[in-house]
Amino acid sequence: MWNEAQIIEGCCKGDKRCQELLFKKYKAVLFGLSLRYCKCREDAEDVLQEGFVKIFSGIKTFRMEGSFEGWLKRIVVNTALNHYKANLKFSFMQNYDDINENDLAGANELHEQKFSSEELMAMVQSLPDGYRVVFNLYAIEGFSHKQIAEMLNINENTSKSQLSRARQVLQKKLINNQKAITV
């Protein structure tokens, strides 16, 4: 059985078996990560593939300090962000006129409704691009608004606004989903 250090060392030497072991070990977690940033499965597959190309070409730069999985995730997140920027078709400043305070008044109606991870993932993926990216970076990855602004080349207040709007949209979707279930 190969341990992580042996796999990394083999990948540094270009050993195809080690590359395959690394891919098999981390493909699910990294694909899930790329899915959170991409609008569709095909884009997530492209991000994953491009991410692994970057991982294999840059694995020699991993200094065996800190979490290897964290290093892999950072590469995939950066790849997803680059993919997003390259395919940016809409402005970050999207206005959702159908969201108002009355829509959010039912937020307290969300009882202990259980949503599957697939349902939650679909709701996040359905967010407009800017909302989805900022939501993932802030709420899931734990980046600050300042870091997000630098990564996406946007204003820090734009990041805050996008997160707020993403939360509003998700909250509305959760409430509507719950109402649909109880009807």
Image: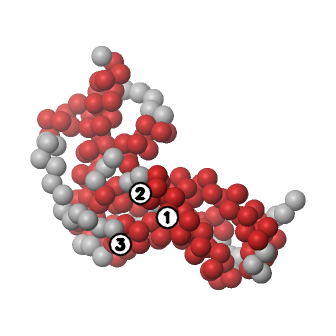
The reply to whether discs 1 and 2 touch (Cβ–Cβ < 8 Å) is: yes
Above or below 111: residue 135: below
Residue at figure coordinates x 34%, y 55% from the top left: 132
Tell me the kind of residue under disc 2.
Answer: Cys
Let me know if residue 18 appears in the view: yes
Q: Indicate the quadrant containing the C terminus: top left, top right, bottom left or bottom right.
A: top left
Q: Give the SS element for disc 1.
A: helix
**Furthest residue to the right?**
1
Residue at disc 3, secondary structure: helix
123 shown above or below 146: above
Density class for disc 1 (Cα within 10 Å; few <14, some 14-19, many ≥20) is: many
**Residue 38 has which mark?**
2
Q: Position of residue 172 (x, y in %)?
A: 26, 37
* Amino acid type of the residue tagged 1 in the rendering: Val
Asked which colour scheme the image uses, the reply is secondary structure
Can you tell which quarter of the image residue 153 is in?
Answer: bottom left
Specify which label sits upstream in the sequence, 3 or 2.
Answer: 2
Q: Which mark is residue 47?
A: 1
| Residue 62 in sight | no
Residue drawn where x is 33% and y is 26% of the image: 178
**Label 2 neighbour load within 10 Å: few <14, some 14-19, many 20+:** many
Name which residue lies at 55% across and 69% down.
51
Task: State how far apart marks 3 and 2 are (Cα).
Answer: 12 Å
Indicate the position of residue 148 as horizontal and vertical percent values.
36, 69
Question: What is the spatial separation of the Cα atoms under label 1 and label 2, in whole angstroms?
Answer: 8 Å
Q: Earlier in the sequence, mark 1 or mark 3?
A: 1
Place of residue 119 in the rendered image (x, y in percent of width and height, measured from the top left): 43, 37
Instruction: Kindly identify which residue carries mark 3.
Output: 86
